[in-house]
Image (cartoon, helix red, strand yellow):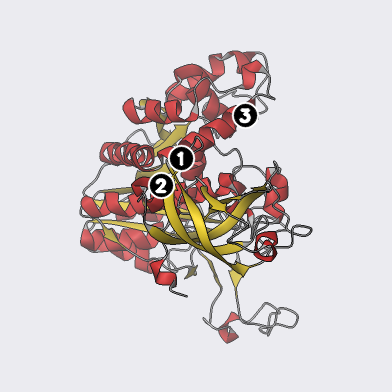
Amino acid sequence: MAFNKRVKIKTLLEQSPIGESVTIMGWVRTRRSNKNVSFIALNDGSIITNYQVVADPNQISEEILKKCATGACLKISGTVVESQGSGQTSELHANSIEVLGEADPEKYPLQPKKHSLEFLREIAHLRMRTNTFGAVFRVRHALAFAVHQYFNDKGFFYIHTPIITASDAEGAGETFKVTTLDIGNPPKTEDGSVDFKQDFFEREANLTVSGQLEGELAALALSEIYTFGPTFRAENSNTTRHLAEFWMIEPEMAFYDAEDNADLAEDFLKYLINYALNNCQEDLKFLENRLLDEEKSKPADQRSEMGLIEKLKFVAENDFVRITYTEAIDILKRSKPNQKKKFQYLIEEWGADLQSEHERYLVEKHFKKPVILTDYPKEIKSFYMRQNEDGKTVAAMDILFPGIGEIVGGSQREERMDLLVRRMEELGIPTDEMWWFLDTRRFGSTPHAGFGLGFERMVQFVTGMGNIRDVIAFPRTPGNAEF
């Protein structure tokens, strides 16, 4: 069948080799016919644009043309000619059509009409065939590639941290357990508790919520590393911002302080956005138009002030605002939504844990720029963050984006053994189980820092998609592990 000789539609559109004989393969988006000719719009996923194929019923049998319904997969050979219509410079005049896979038009769920995103989530195994999801996942690929290119060019090393672990890096307890025991009848100890000594790992284990702690071990040997892998959180949340399985990018750097950390994170985010702008123009333009169309149904005051591409350029070209948590609290306390009790969570005193509504107010209403918030109260942050000299705050950093809220969270890590142990004891974190982590402070400790970027939130921001479930191929959420 000479599959290896097919020409991708992206290549065909870029080169338009007029007069040449080529073979293309892909899925039918639409077919329309008149007495003299059939027009087939074919897409192979390499680009958002369909390629027009012209089929003459005198050359291609009616039996074959009937099978060229929406969703069918075709192999088409023919000659590239200049297009008579508008929209593309060339088209293919078919000499032969082979139906590789039929699609019954009475049963195929993706007909050429507008489908809701909710419906498409129910058929996630097919939704990548739509323009919207084809665009989203091409952009996602580009961003993933850019992650590796950025860190590689800066001399970072890519470390694969474990997916199965015995630690809960965040201490929140929202982990998925990993076991080979019979959960209906597990072995018990004398005191009646589950005997994990008989389990595969001979101890309790779970899916990782973060690769950070193991990343720190690598950074304190290789200086600059990053992880990029799946993480899991058993948080029973059905918001548009949460997934149970998601991907995290977590760089860890020896010889970095809090300011170095913020500088790297800002540069990294701008690099990713610029990479998408430079390499995903057609997809971003489509997604921008989709967003404009979606917002027509919203009240004027709820519509975006900028188009998608303008917003991306604005973020990439402007310095992020840097303020402390204390400054942010003062702004929020004095804000109209707080004074008029419009916030769901009112800001009344220093020490409050900021919610998404507060983060978005700072970014979208007050500064109208991305914001880097620093120096949070230690009581609302994790044990491993470096304690500041005031005894009340830690050298934490969150980056807040419009439409998203927190997109990056990080800190300078606590490198001082005595302070780290004291903080772990205060929070009830068993130091004996974390002996391996404490060894990095015991032997050759140094100032170091790192952050985590939720990859899906980044893809959400760049694509303008409103729901995080629409930027990962097969979303895992409470009650949903289909496909």
Could you tell me which residue is drawn at 47 percent across and 34 percent down? 285
Looking at marks 2 and 3 on the same chain, the residue that comes earlier in the sequence is marked by 2
| Mark 1 vs 2: CB contact within 8 A | yes
| Mark seen at residue 13 | 2
The relative height of residue 22 versus residue 362 in the rendered view (above or below) is: below
- Quickly name the residue at label 3: 293
Image x and y of residue 299, in percent: 68, 19
Image x and y of residue 249, in percent: 40, 52
Report crowding for label 1: few under 14, some 14 to 19, many 20 or more residues within 10 A (C-alpha): some
Query: Could you tell me which quadrant the C terminus lies in?
Result: bottom right
Image x and y of residue 480, in percent: 70, 59
Residue closer to the observer: 1 or 248: 1
Determine the CA span between mark 2 and mark 3: 27 Å
Residue 436, quarter of the rendered image: bottom left
Can the viewer see residue 384 in this picture?
A: no
Could you tell me which residue is drawn at 46 percent across and 50 percent down? 138
The reply, left or right, for residue 253 in relation to residue 341 is left
- Quickly name the residue at label 1: 88
